[in-house]
Amino acid sequence: MGSTADKIKGTANEYAGKAKQGVGEAVGSEKLEGEGAIQEGKGHAQQAVGDAKAAAEKAAGKAKDALK
C-alpha cells in the first residue's frame, strides 16, 4: 500500500473511531467508546506509516537524483 493510501485509510479510521466514541457516549456504551478509541488510535498509526513511507520515498528520490 502506498503512502497516500495509508494516509487516507488512517483518516477514515480516525473519523470512524471518533464517531463510534460519540455514539457510545450518547447511548452510554463504554464498550463502543472503547472500540472507537482503539479505531481512532489505529487511524493515527496508519497515518504515521503513510508519513514514514512518504519520507522514505522522498529520500530515495533524492538519492537517485544525486547519483545521476
Image: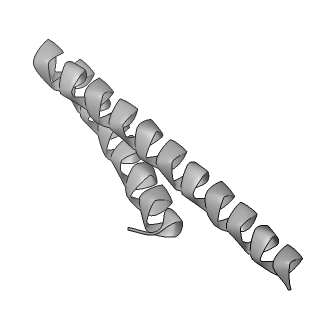
Q: Who's the residue at 38% across and 31% down the image?
A: 41
Asked whether, in this view, residue 17 is left or right of residue 53, the answer is left
Q: How many marks?
A: 0
Quarter of the image for residue 55 reads bottom right
Quadrant for the N terminus in the image: bottom left
**Residue reaching furthest to the front:** 67
Q: Who's the residue at 52% across and 67% down the image?
A: 4
Asked whether, in this view, residue 33 is left or right of residue 14, the answer is left
Q: Indicate whether 38 appears above or below 5.
A: above
Task: Examine the rendering and report whether any part of residue 57 can be seen.
Answer: yes
Quarter of the image for residue 66 reads bottom right
Point out residue 31 in the picture as x, y percentages from the top left corner: 12, 18
Point out residue 10 in the picture as x, y percentages from the top left corner: 42, 50
Q: Indicate whether 68 appears above or below 25.
A: below
Point out residue 16 in the picture as x, y percentages from the top left corner: 31, 45
Q: Indicate whether 58 appears above or below 18.
A: below
Task: Examine the rendering and report whether any part of residue 29 can be seen.
Answer: no
- Name the colouring of the figure: one colour
- Pick the front one: 47 or 57: 57
Q: Who's the residue at 15% across and 25% down the image?
A: 32
Quadrant for the C terminus in the image: bottom right
Q: Indicate whether 60 appears above or below 48.
A: below
**Residue reaching furthest to the bottom:** 68
Q: Who's the residue at 43% across and 59% down the image?
A: 6
